[in-house]
Image (cartoon, rainbow, N blue to C red):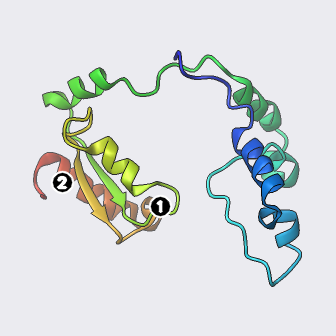
């Protein structure tokens, strides 16, 4: 879309800029000492992953990752009018939102799902029963609950 562009390894670039201003977050330093905190990067991808993780090397993964980082012609991801139209009778939807999810900002999720938004017809299950790995931990239970919520059988 008009506001999209190539990521050009945005997570790695942001990290490197951050470490320049605050060296205590340099993983090369923190991994050398038991007295330093363990750094947690979450769901970021760095260019050097294909070199450090054998599972990501070969099979063109490095070429693929670089191609994705340079791709700049992404289409618009969310089109509010299309979402709204789909949820007005055609599609029933429910979501699980984990209050203390380490990767997903709860307040931003609530903003996306607020009344008047394109997704305000989505039934929301806010829970701390699971974390970001909920589908891996109890996929059948979560999907069963969400399906029942979407059908209106569980409120």
Of all residues shown, which one is farthest toward the front? 21
Q: Position of residue 51 (x, y in %)?
A: 88, 48
Are the two marked residues, 1 and 2, in contact with CB atoms closer than 8 angstroms? no
| Residue 144 found in image quarter | bottom left
Height in image: 123 above or below 37? above
Secondary structure state at the residue bearing disc 2? helix
Q: Position of residue 6 (x, y in %)?
A: 68, 25
| Residue 66 found in image quarter | top right
Q: Which labelled disc corresponds to residue 118?
A: none
In screen coordinates, is 66 left or right of 94? right
In screen coordinates, is 86 left or right of 43? left
In screen coordinates, is 85 left or right of 49? left
Residue drawn 53% across and 15% down? 2
Q: Position of residue 73 (x, y in %)?
A: 61, 16
- Cα–Cα gap, marks 1 and 2: 21 Å
Height in image: 29 above or below 57? below
The tally of labels here is 2
Q: Position of residue 154 (x, y in %)?
A: 13, 58
Residue drawn 37% across and 49% down? 109
Return the disc, 1 or 2, that comes first in the chain's sequence: 1
Residue drawn 80% across and 84% down? 35
Which residue has dot 1 on it? Answer: 132
Which residue has dot 2 on it? Answer: 148
Q: Nearer the viewer, residue 58 or 74?
A: 74
Height in image: 21 above or below 75? below
Secondary structure state at the residue bearing disc 1? loop
In screen coordinates, is 110 left or right of 85? right
Height in image: 154 above or below 73? below
Q: Nearer the viewer, mark 1 or mark 2?
A: 1
Q: Residues within 10 Å of mark 1 (few under 14, many from 20)?
A: some
């Amino acid at each position: 879309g008009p506001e999209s562009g190539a990521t050009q390894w945005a997570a790695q670039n942001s990290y490197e800029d951050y470490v320049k201003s605050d060296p205590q977050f340099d993983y090369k330093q923190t991994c050398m000492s038991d007295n330093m905190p363990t750094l947690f990067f979450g769901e970021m991808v760095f260019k050097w992953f294909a070199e450090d993780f054998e599972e990501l090397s070969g099979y063109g993964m490095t070429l693929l990752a670089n191609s994705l980082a340079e791709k700049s012609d992404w289409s618009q991801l969310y089109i509010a009018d299309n979402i709204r139209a789909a949820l007005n009778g055609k599609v029933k939807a429910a979501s699980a939102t984990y209050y203390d999810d380490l990767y997903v900002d709860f307040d931003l999720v609530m903003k996306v799902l607020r009344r008047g938004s394109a997704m305000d017809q989505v039934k929301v299950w806010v829970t701390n029963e699971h974390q970001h790995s909920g589908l891996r931990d109890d996929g059948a239970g979560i999907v069963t609950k969400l399906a029942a919520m979407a059908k209106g059988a569980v409120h």
